[in-house]
Amino acid sequence: MHESWKEFLESEFNKPYFKELSEFLHNEYEHKTIFPPKKLVFSAFTTDLNDVKVVILGQDPYHTPGAAEGLAFSVPSSQPIPPSLINIYKEIDSDIGHHNNPTGSLRNWQKQGVLLLNTVLTVEAHKAKSHSGKGWEIFTTAVISYLNSKCDNLVFILWGRDARNKKSLIDTNRHLVLEAAHPSPLSAYNGFFGCKHFSSCNKYLEEHNKTPIEW
């Protein structure tokens, strides 16, 4: 985790809800197959807080072996590109002409100041949403609230119902909020395709003297 997050994270880790969540996770990792591996759960927070320009909020991690790496929608470069990310790349191509990633790794987005955050940070193998309602939503609500108050002129990209539920935490006078259906094959045709979030995001960044993202 990056030093810039230390004060915030330590404060959350000491709260009663997080202690309960930690006990639950300890037991889960002990007796079941949980993704991502423990050491990658907080990968999103290796992004320097002071460099964050864009927040992409997803749901929970990929629940198939080897895919989840602690960054929303991203998989290690050795893994096949998941269907949701294929749809994200399709939307980038139709929106701005091309995407820059040859693999499913989004680490180059992260390096440019994109915080790739899920609303729930862990999941049991092959059981989507199995760690919902255990405390992660409280944690990620705190993260969004912290970013909202700490930073100026961020772009929050909310895909899917779980992410869109966080909209009320964001001051739309200080930040840009972009919402759409989740990019999964089940919902991408309900408003994700054609949302033009990538060009809208970069236009806003340029208007506020920030370097646009190379998607």
Image: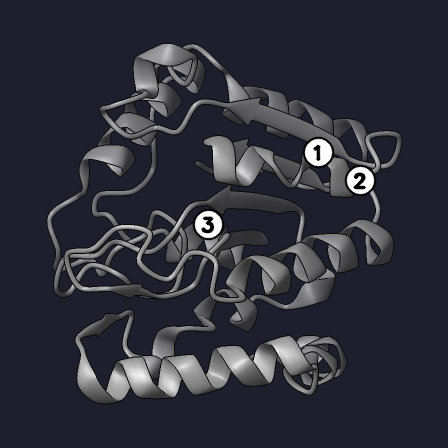
**Pointer 3 with pointer 1, Cβ within 8 A:** no
Give the image location of residue 137, x and y in percent: 56, 57
SS at mark 2 in the image: loop
Q: Which residue is mark 3?
A: 109
Give the image location of residue 6, x and y in percent: 69, 83
Quadrant of the rendered image containing residue 63: bottom left
**Point 24% across, 48% down: residue:** 104
Is residue 203 depicted above or below 57 in this figure?
Answer: above
Quadrant of the rendered image containing residue 156: top right
Q: CA distance from mark 3 to mark 2?
A: 18 Å
In which quadrant will I find the N terminus? bottom right
**Pointer 3 with pointer 2, Cβ within 8 A:** no
In which quadrant will I find the C terminus? top left
N-term-proximal mark, 2 vs 1: 2
N-term-proximal mark, 3 vs 1: 3
N-term-proximal mark, 3 vs 2: 3
SS at mark 3 in the image: helix
Q: CA distance from mark 3 to mark 1?
A: 14 Å
- Residue in the foreground of this view, choosing between 200 and 45: 45
Q: Circle 3: is it few (<14), some (14-19), or many (20+) Cα within 10 Å?
A: some
- Asked which colour scheme the image uses, the reply is one colour
Q: CA distance from mark 2 to mark 1?
A: 8 Å
**Pointer 2 with pointer 1, Cβ within 8 A:** yes
Give the image location of residue 147, x and y in percent: 75, 55
Mark number, residue 153: 2
Q: Amino acid at mark 2?
A: Asn
Q: Which residue is mark 1?
A: 205
Q: Amino acid at mark 1?
A: Leu
